[in-house]
Image (spheres, helix red, strand yellow):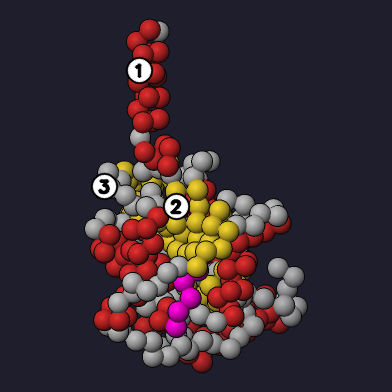
Amino acid sequence: MAIRGLLSSITRRTLLSHPLARHASTLVVAEHEGGSIKAASLSAVEAAKRLGEENSISMLLAGSGPSLQEAAEQAASCHPSISEVFVADSDKLLHPLAEPWAKLIQLIQQKEGFSHILAASDSFGKNIIPRASALLDVSPTTDVIEISDTRQFVRPIYAGNALCAVRYTGGDPCILTVRATSFQADPTNAKSGNKARISQVDLSALEGDVIGKSRHVSLTSQDTERPDLGNARVVVTGGRGLKSAENFKMIEKLAEKLGAAVGATRAAVDAGFVPNDLQVGQTGKIVAPELYLAFGVSGAIQHIAGMRDSKVIVAVNKDADAPIFQVADYGLVGDLFEVIPDLLEKLPQKSSR
């Protein structure tokens, strides 16, 4: 008992003497659009909260114009854990190019000295965080799905077939990208009444040669009323079994009836059935909807890595041995060209789901 008490005392003193135990502070690099913080960035804030109750959380927003100010106002009250919102207002930061954003993160880190920097593990975070890590001379921990301690995390490996515990032993800041589907934000956070301080970032040190290494050419988006693939409650996905882009329209019609998002496998994207922003999988988007419907999807390991956390998975495939049935909650061995028309006929327009 005496030895156990001595060890406990030593452990407590070690934790208290560690700088993270006293000065934990986190910067969440956030993405916004149309004056609103994106859901994935709110999930990053939720992940930051799990680094400790005493952790001070700040959010970084960049861009220009009225939409940036609207996003800053929302950020200041979107989560009770956020204590400060840093706003970098410049036309040079209007688009999420890695060079200026990484330099911005470096400037803020040099001034504020955060213990952690977080971003969502989406196209925004994956583009910016590696370059920012290089500028700060640290190694990032990517695609985190669980935070065990301030320096220990869990991330998937081997396309999600195994989980790896990672301990970060480098210097500050500890940089993470987190999988948004593993840190769902609480919708009631915005009603907490919290109002964080909004601070303008001094951008005088941003160098022109750094800004000019890449440029934004254009942004193309689909004009649709369907929900965003990454945040939808229901996702309808089609695979190579649909055989053509014309046949893939059946998936889109079914999604419209269900009020669902449309997804696709890499094989369907590579075949030109749909654009690559609809790809679900290890090299596409990671989704975890309440209902995932897969038609003509064989279940390649790379695809399953992007949807295995879905609450309910329904698969339709004419091959009874297709790997998708190993992860499906409900499976139907049948011809999708018969099943989908039957569903379209029997389902009412835009289900309440």
Q: Please, what is the three-letter code of the amino acid marked with disc 1?
A: Leu
Q: Position of residue 232 (x, y in %)?
A: 60, 69
Q: Secondary structure at mark 2?
A: strand
Q: Is residue 89 magenta?
A: yes
Residue at 37% of width from left, 52% of height from top?
Answer: 113
Label 3 sits on residue:
170
Label 3 sits on what residue type? Gly
Q: Amino acid at mark 2?
A: Thr
In the structure shown, which secondary structural element does the residue marked by tag 3 occupy? loop
Q: Which residues are magenta?
A: 87-91
The local crowd at label 1, few if under 14, some if 14 to 19, many if 20 or more residues have their Cα within 10 Å, is: few
Q: Nearer the viewer, residue 319 or 237?
A: 237
State how far apart marks 3 and 1 are (Cα).
Answer: 25 Å
Where, by quadrant of the figure, is residue 177 drawn? bottom left
Q: Is residue 328 above or below residue 269?
A: above
Q: Please determine whether, in this image, residue 64 is positioned above or below residue 223.
A: above
State the residue at coordinates (39%, 40%): 20
**Which residue is tagged 1?**
7
Q: Position of residue 304 (x, y in %)?
A: 43, 63
Q: Nearer the viewer, residue 189 or 183?
A: 189
Q: Is residue 87 left or right of residue 16?
A: right
Q: Are marks 2 and 3 in contact (CB under 8 Å)?
A: no
Q: Which is more N-terminal, label 1 or label 3? A: 1
Q: Which residue lies under the disc numbered 2? A: 26
Quarter of the image that includes the C terminus: bottom right
Q: Magenta stretch: dominant SS?
A: strand
Q: Residue at x 56, y 53 (%)?
A: 83
Task: Please report the residue visible at 33 percent of the width from the left and 63 percent of the height from the top.
Answer: 106
Position of residue 82 relative to residue 263, above or below, is above
Counting residues from the start of the chain, the first of labels 1 and 2 encountered is 1
Q: Quadrant of residue 301?
A: bottom left
Q: Residue furthest top?
A: 2
